[in-house]
Amino acid sequence: MIKTCIIGASGYTGAELAAIVNQHPNFELAALFVSTNSADAGKPLGDIHPKLFGQISLKLQPIDESKLTDLATNFDLIFLATPHEASHKWMTDLTGRKAVVMDLSGAFRIKDKHVFADYYGFEHTAADLLDKAVYGLADWHQDEISKANLVAVPGCYPTASLTALKPLEQLIDPAYFPVINATSGVSGAGRKAALTSSFTEVSLQAYGVLGHRHQPEIADYFGAPVIFTPHLGNFKRGILATICVKMHAGTTQAQINATYKAAYKDSSIVRLRNSWPKIDDVTHTPYCDLFWKYDEKTGYLIVSSAIDNLLKGAASQAMQCANLRFGFESHAGLVN
């Protein structure tokens, strides 16, 4: 069994991770940690997230920052469901030892530290670890993930967008930027209460326009500029991304269909649909559902991508990465 702990276990993503690890046949959920000043410290996880009541008896321990190296020595696998600043601050102590680290924050996704500073608001001081971190887009970077000791698990918007876009890399006309419009439920903002993500305050609106931190992440791992506009919707969880791309002249419907089928022929997670997906199709599941329509007259393709932001956009993709790193099937413990 792979001895596993979760740091940041009281949040929405941390709780989803705990549930996944707890029922996984190859991983042992050995400890759960929260920040030192967390009001949840000392409480059983099931008291914080009642859906886990009676399933997970572990209590949430306050993290002792002076003993991070002990954690990295004693555990085989550490999931960080922590703020970007915490992951950045702690990573030097957590890496280079026994533990493999799956970081679900954005601290090690963007390779250019200057771009990182522009979008995250603080300077990156661990450039050597930036170089070592592998981007955990689990349906595309399997070989790299299988050898990595530090995996930067992608954000939820980039996961939905890149899963739709990457099969098309050789077919898209580079003169036209892909245009991504994506809407997330309020759980994407995390568990901490805030007026801007309060369910009674949210309607449907764009935010982070032409400046969201996931824009450079999507562009980096797609390999070309994109226009990305996120929206916040009045629902709990899930992401629906609708993407418009201009294809090379002469591209056919048959080529596009064949490209998607080839890209995901071995995937148990990415489902190529026969109709437009909706968020209800994927919430509480690890799947990414795709569907597309092509206008051969104009050369424009519309792709729709649906995921659960807390699962495929965070916890279940992190588990896919852990599976790959420890030699199991990517979908192990996630789908039958």
Image (cartoon, helix red, strand yellow):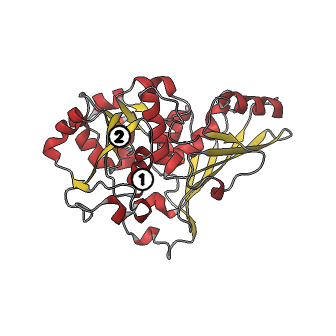
Residue drawn at x 16%, y 49% is: 64
* Tag 1 residue: 13
Residue closest to the far front: 54
Residue annotated with mark 2:
28
- Badge 1 marks a residue whose secondary structure is helix
* Sequence-wise first label, 2 or 1: 1
The residue closer to the viewer here, 4 or 163, is: 4
Count of residue discs = 2
Image quarter of the N terminus: top left
Quadrant in which the C terminus appears: top right
Q: Quadrant of residue 165?
A: top right
Q: Residue 253 at x, y = what percent?
A: 82, 34
In this view, the residue farthest toward the bottom is: 200
- Which residue is at the far left? 66
Residue kind at label 1, given as amino acid type:
Thr
Q: Is residue 122 visible in the rendered structure shown here?
A: no
How dense is the environment of label 2, judged by Cα within 10 Å: few (below 14), some, or many (20 and up)? some
Q: Position of residue 244 (x, y in %)?
A: 69, 46
Q: Which mark is residue 308?
A: none
